[in-house]
């Protein structure tokens, strides 16, 4: 790779980025950041109308965006989604496996097989299948960057309601290393981005179910606060861009100093 000036390393002009679960929360913040860095982006969630709405807003702000719905929990639907992206843009350079679910439970004693399978189906199997289908597209292009969005809950669950979610994110962390080792010869890097507590809809829903959760999570990091959504964008751009060209199989925490 030719040497670049540091100011050029974050430039994503000419690249295509897919972000799953990108109509709200962390996914949308990442999507908008990638767009501002010059990438053509794919807005994706289960709801086509919502995808179209967000894509329209990004185009109105001067970006390039298309909305293509996909339920990442549907293994067989993902190849058609990837084909639709390639048909539209001709390439894929960046993938953020961000889509995830975290249905609250009271504690581990009430976890059912149905709930366990539902969470792992979306949070782990969806990321695996999406990456399986997109990595060869990156290989046939100029390589690429896959970023699995994990969670600090994957290191140590902070609350009983996150028991299944935390287990799924721990599995995703392990899977990230396997992906990185397998696809490194294809010039495809794979890393894990681990947010701590962010002011997302998911966290606000947890606060409703378990009042005091926000204060508890804020107290678990040295900054003693919940992060604002824009604070995920810099680390996301780092992993998506050439700035992290020698980084793969790694995990980066954006957690206000929480211990792994």
Image (tube, grey):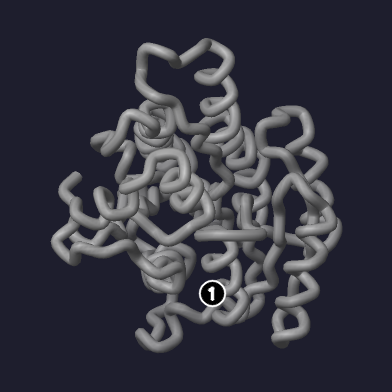
At a point 79% along the width and 54% down the height, the residue shown is 68
Residue 14: x and y in percent read: 66, 76
Is 192 placed left or right of 204 in the picture? Answer: left
Secondary structure of the residue carrying tag 1 is helix
Task: Tell me where residue 58 sits by quadrant.
Answer: bottom right
Task: Tell me where residue 135 sits by quadrant.
Answer: top right
Asked if residue 123 can be seen in this view, the reply is yes
Q: Nearer the viewer, residue 210 or 24?
A: 210
Residue 193: x and y in percent read: 38, 53
- Residue 101 to residue 94: above or below: above
Is 258 placed left or right of 150 in the picture? Answer: left
Residue 175: x and y in percent read: 42, 33
The number of numbered discs placed on residues in the rendered structure image is 1
Q: Nearer the viewer, residue 203 or 175?
A: 203
- Residue 146 to residue 124: above or below: below
At a point 59% along the width and 73% down the height, the residue shown is 32
Label 1 Cα crowd, 10 Å radius (few <14 / some 14-19 / many 20+): some
Image quarter of the N terminus: bottom left
Which residue is denoted by mark 1 in the rendering?
Answer: 33
Q: Nearer the viewer, residue 176 or 51?
A: 51
Residue 203: x and y in percent read: 44, 50
Is 118 placed left or right of 234 in the picture? Answer: right
Asked if residue 188 can be seen in this view, the reply is no
At a point 77% along the width and 58% down the height, the residue shown is 50
Q: Nearer the viewer, residue 172 or 57?
A: 57
At a point 44% along the width and 26% down the height, the residue shown is 105
């Amino acid at each position: 790779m030719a040497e670049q000036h540091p100011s050029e390393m974050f430039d994503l002009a000419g690249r295509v980025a897919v972000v799953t679960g990108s109509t709200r929360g962390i996914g949308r913040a990442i999507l908008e950041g990638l767009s501002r860095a010059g990438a053509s982006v794919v807005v994706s969630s289960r709801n086509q109308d919502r995808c179209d709405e967000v894509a329209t807003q990004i185009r109105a702000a001067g970006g390039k965006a298309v909305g293509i719905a996909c339920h990442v929990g549907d293994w067989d639907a993902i190849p058609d989604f990837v084909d639709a992206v390639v048909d539209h843009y001709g390439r894929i350079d960046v993938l953020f496996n961000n889509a995830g679910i975290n249905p609250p439970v009271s504690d581990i004693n009430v976890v059912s097989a149905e709930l366990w399978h539902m969470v792992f189906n979306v949070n782990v199997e969806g990321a695996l299948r999406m990456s399986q289908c997109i990595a060869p597209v990156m290989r046939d292009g100029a390589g690429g960057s896959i970023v699995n969005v994990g969670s600090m809950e994957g290191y140590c669950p902070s609350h009983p309601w996150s028991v299944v979610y935390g287990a799924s994110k721990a599995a995703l962390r392990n899977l990230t290393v396997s992906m990185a080792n397998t696809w490194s010869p294809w010039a495809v890097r794979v890393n894990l981005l681990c947010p701590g507590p962010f002011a997302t809809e998911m966290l606000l829903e947890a606060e409703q179910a378990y009042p005091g959760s926000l204060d508890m999570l804020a107290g678990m990091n040295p900054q003693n606060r919940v992060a604002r959504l824009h604070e995920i964008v810099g680390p996301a751009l780092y992993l998506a861009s050439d700035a992290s060209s020698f980084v793969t199989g790694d995990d980066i925490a954006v957690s206000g100093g929480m211990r792994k």
